[in-house]
Amino acid sequence: MTILSIALIVICCLGPGLIKAQEQPDSSYLLHEVIVTARQPNRDIIPVQTLSGEELNRLNSNSVADALRYFSGVQVKDYGGVGGIKTVNIRSMGTNHTGVVYDGVELGNAQNGQIDLGQFSLDNIEALSLYNGQKSEILQPAKDFGSAGTIYMRTRTPVFNEGEQYHARATIRSGSFDLLNPSALVELKLSERVSASLSAEWINSSGKYKFRYRRVNPAGELAYDTTAVRQNGDINATRIELNTHGTLRSGSWTFKVYNYNSERGVPGAIVNNVWRRGERIWDTNSFAQGRYTGFFGKFSTLNNIKYAFYRTHYVNNDDKQVKIDNLYRQKEIYISSANEYAISDRWRVSGSYDFLWNTLDADVYGFVKPDRVSQFLSVATALGLDRFKAQASLLATFIHDKIKGQKAPSDKHVLSPALFLNAYPLSNTDFSIRAFFKQSFRMPTFNDLYYADMGNSLLSPERVTQYNVGLVYDHNSSASLISGARLTADLYYNRVKDKIVAYPKGQQFRWTMLNLGLVDIRGIDITGLLSINPAKDLLFTLRAQYTFQRAIDITNPADNYYKDQIPYIPRHSGSAVVNAQWKGWNLNYSWIYVGERYNQQENIRYNYTQPWYTSDVSVSKDFRVGKVSLRGLIEINNLLSQDYDVILNYPMPKRNYRFSITAEI
C-alpha cells in the first residue's frame, strides 16, 4: 500500500506537466535538448573527467571498467580475464560510495551494493564521465545528490541528416582466449519526432590464458615459480538494448529496455597450488526505464520511472569446499521527479523527490527476505555570475527496512549537505579555481545486514566527508599549432567514519560485520590533455593523469596496522595515452601504472604487492566502399607481456590480441 500510495502521489504531481507537454501543437520541430546539453567544458563547477566520441573508441578497452582506468583517482578491481568481475573505487572511499548512472537513471544492487562494470560494453556508449562529488547540474534526481562520486554512462542518440531514414553498424571481434564477440546496432527514424535504436551483442570466450605463478616467502626464498593456464574463466553472455527517443515542442522523452544474460566461471584465487575451481554464476539483469524532460519558460522538469529484476544463480561444486547451489532474486521500483525554477538568468533553484523500493529473495534456509523502502528529498540552488559560480544542495534520506520473522532495524534518517564554488580570477575564462565540501553516506547492503552467518542488523550507515580544492587551465584555439590544452590539479581530503568491515568468527565462511573503521584519505589528482596540429590532416593527442593517495586506517592506536595504508590502495598511480591520426590511419599507445600496495591491513613485507604497469597498442584504418564506412582494428594488449596481479592471486593475462572489423551505413 505504501508503494502504491506514493506512486499515485508522484503520478498526480507529474500529470499536469505531462498533459501540458502532450497538448503542445505539432506544427514545429525544435531541438531544445541541443541548447540544454551544450555546455563549455571549463564551465563545470564540479571536477569532471570525460571520454567521448572518437577518443573513447580509440582506447584499448572492451568494457566500461577498462576505460575508467584512464581516469585519475580511480582504482579498478579486476579479477582477471574477459568475464572476470570488475568494480571501481573512487578516491579510496569504497565501491559502495560510487554511483553508476546509465542514461540518467542510477543502477542499483541492494544485495551487495556493487555494480559489475564488466557487464557494460563500450559498443553503444557515446560518452563516459566521472564526477567527484556530484554533477554540475541541480536539475537531477534526488538520489544523484547522495553519492560521493558518480560515473555517468550515456548511450548513443540517433542523429539523422536530411533524407536519412536509418543507420546500421555491425562489428565482429576475435582474438586471444578463443574470443568471439559480434555486435550490431540499428537506428531508425520513425517520424520527424521519434527515433529508435536496437543494440545487441554476444561475447563468448574460454577465458584460458597462460600466466606465471611466482611467489617469494618472507625470508626472500623462492617458494613457487611455474607457468600454468587459467581455468574456469569462461563466459557466454548476451546483451540486448532497445532505446526510443522522442522530441516534443517543449521537451523530450526516452524509453529503454535492457537485458543482460550470462553464464560464466569464477576462476578463483590461485593459492596452495590449486588451479581449478568449481564455482559458476548465471546472471540475468533486466530493467525498463522511462525519462521525460520538459521546459516551460522559467520552469523545467525531469521525471524518471524504472522497474528492474536481477536474478543470480550461484553454484559451487568444488570437492574440497561446502557444496552450494543458491538462487537470488532482486526487484526494484524507482520513481523520481526533479523540478527547477529560474528566479533570474543567474539564479536557479530546484527540488527533487525519489522513491525507491528494493526486495531480495533467496532459496537459502532461514533467509529473512528483506524489504527496503528508501525516500530521497533534495533542495538545491545554483548561482552563476560572470566570474563566479556556486552550487549548494541538501539531501534528506529516509530508509525503512522490513524483514521476515524478525524485528527490523530502526529507520534511518540522514541529512547530507554539499557546497561547490568556482571562480574565474582572470578576464579570460582559461583559468579557474574550484572548491567543494560534501557529506554523504552509504546504507549497509542486504548482505551486510542480513546475510546468514555474516550480517549484523545493528550496523550504522558509513559516512563520508569530502573536501576538494583545485585549479583548471583550459584553452582551445583552432588557428594555432596547439589546438587544445587542458591541465587540472585537485587536492582533496576525505574522512570515512563508521566504516563497515568484516571480521572472521573463527570458522571458515563465518564472518561478522562491525562498524569499526575510521579512514583518513589525502591525495592529489593531476590531469593533462594536449592536442597538436603540426601539419594538415595530422593530429597528435596526448592525455596523462597522475594520482597520489595517502589512505590510512586511524581506527584504533592499539592496532598493529594503525596509520597503515589501507589494502590495495597505491600511493602512486597514473596513465598516459598518445594518439596520432593521419588520413584515416589511427595509432594509439596507452600506458597504465599502479604503484606498490599491501593486500592486507598490516603494511608488512609479507603483505607487500609489487607495482605493475602495462602497455597497449592499437592501429586502425578507416575507409569507404561506396556508401559503407569500414574500420579495421588490430590491438595488442600488455605489449611487454608483464606478469601482474590487480588483486593478489588473481593473475592477469600476458600479451594478448584482438582483431575487429566494423561496417557502418
Image (spheres, helix red, strand yellow):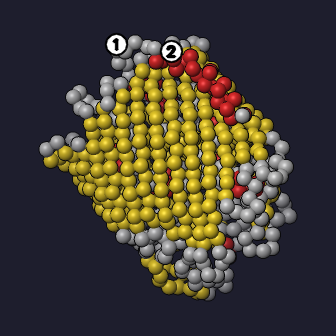
Q: Secondary structure at mark 1?
A: loop
Residue 68 falls left or right of residue 585: right
Residue 297 image position (x, y, % from top left): 51, 12
Q: Which residue is mark 2?
A: 20
**Across the whole image, how many numbered discs are drawn on residues?**
2
Depicted 29 relative to depicted 597: above or below: above
Residue 470 image position (x, y, % from top left): 59, 38
The amino acid type, in three-letter code, at marker 1 is Ser
Q: Work out whether residue 522 or residue 69 is closer to the camera in this orientation and state it.
A: 69
Residue 335 image position (x, y, % from top left): 61, 33
Q: Work out whether residue 348 or residue 255 is closer to the camera in this orientation and state it.
A: 255
The amino acid type, in three-letter code, at marker 2 is Lys
Q: Residue at x 33, y 46 (%)?
A: 185
Q: Residue at x 42, y 45 (%)?
A: 241
Residue 271 visible: yes
Q: Which residue is mark 1?
A: 27
Q: Secondary structure at mark 2?
A: helix
Q: Quadrant of residue 268?
A: bottom right
Residue 466 falls left or right of residue 643: right
- Label located before the other in sequence (1 or 2): 2
State which quarter of the image contains the C terminus: top left
